[in-house]
Amino acid sequence: MTALADAETNAGTDESASGMGEIPSFEVTMRLERFDPDVESPQARWEDFTLTMHGTDRVLDALHKIKWDHDGSLAFRRSCAHGICGSDAMRINGKNRLACKTLLKDLDTSKPITVEPIKGLPVKKDLIVDMEPFFASYREVMPFLITSGNQPSAERLQSAEQRARFDDTTKCILCAACTTSCPVFWTDGQYFGPAAIVNAHRFIFDSRDEGGTQRLQILNDKEGVWRCRTTFNCSEACPRGIEVTKAIAEVKRAIVTRTF
């Protein structure tokens, strides 16, 4: 009897131990905005997919599951899947986020989770938008180091304080989450947008750069920094935590005072 009791106890212990590492699963409905440009009279439509997911899964994992197991025609961008490449910015439950950084368990899974393309840019297919207008503004602010004279024989030195002056805006990953969260950008396709201004800021306040005056002239345009209405949508949307609105205000101040 004692041996039998010990065997039953050990079996129960083994069962408990085997369940300790299990990740809880749950059902979730993903409601995706779909758009196929190749059909006759293409129009956006919503499509629901009910999935069994786990507590460690992100929205990107759910999109992968849909594409791989349910509908291979689903189109979306992704690359590194670690919040660095900026490829998978989309509107999730009405807010701009990176799909790879948004855990399903952090959303209200009792309701359908809506996923749609970021606003203000032309939709090419499903969750993919045409990024060319965004990058055209980015290129226009000359996001590179401008210097004069001969190429130096050693690195251009910079103090820690000088580097800290523009440290925040070096974090931009060009995901367009900030720009496409801006109501001015939604209604005015000519506005440079927050991301372009952030990347101009990164060089305007770099002590090694000599192109600050040129960039300020470019941004002192009717479609430049003065179109910003300081709604803070951009700062809230940034997955890298950049103080976007603060950077825009600093560029405005530099235009007025010509100090940078």
Image (spheres, helix red, strand yellow):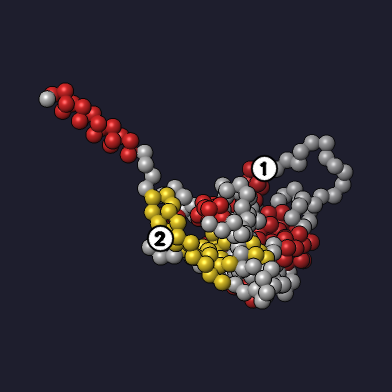
Give the residue displayed 69% in from the left and 72% down from the top. Answer: 189
Q: Quadrant of the C terminus?
A: bottom right
| 29, 202: nearer the viewer | 29
Residue 63: tell me if it is visible: no
Residue 54 percent across, percent down from the top left: 42, 49
Give the residue displayed 64% in from the left and 70% down from the top. Answer: 120
Q: Secondary structure at mark 2?
A: loop
Residue to which mark 2 is pinned: 109
Residue 39 percent across, percent down from the top left: 67, 71
Residue 221 percent across, percent down from the top left: 74, 71
Q: Amino acid at mark 2?
A: Thr
| 236, 106: nearer the viewer | 106
Give the residue displayed 21% in from the left and 27% down from the top. Answer: 7
Q: Quadrant of residue 17?
A: top left
Residue to which mark 1 is pinned: 159
| 21, 160: nearer the viewer | 21
Residue 182 percent across, percent down from the top left: 60, 69
Residue 170: tell me if it is visible: yes
Q: Amino acid at mark 1?
A: Ser
| Number of numbered discs visible in the structure rendering | 2
Q: Quadrant of residue 10?
A: top left
**Marks 2,1: beta carbons within 8 A:** no
Question: For the residue carrying disc 2, how many other residues have a C-alpha within 10 Å: few (<14), some (14-19), or many (20+)?
Answer: some
Q: Does label 2 or label 1 sit earlier along the sequence?
A: 2
- Residue 119, label in figure: none
Residue 60 versus residue 254 in the image, above or below: above
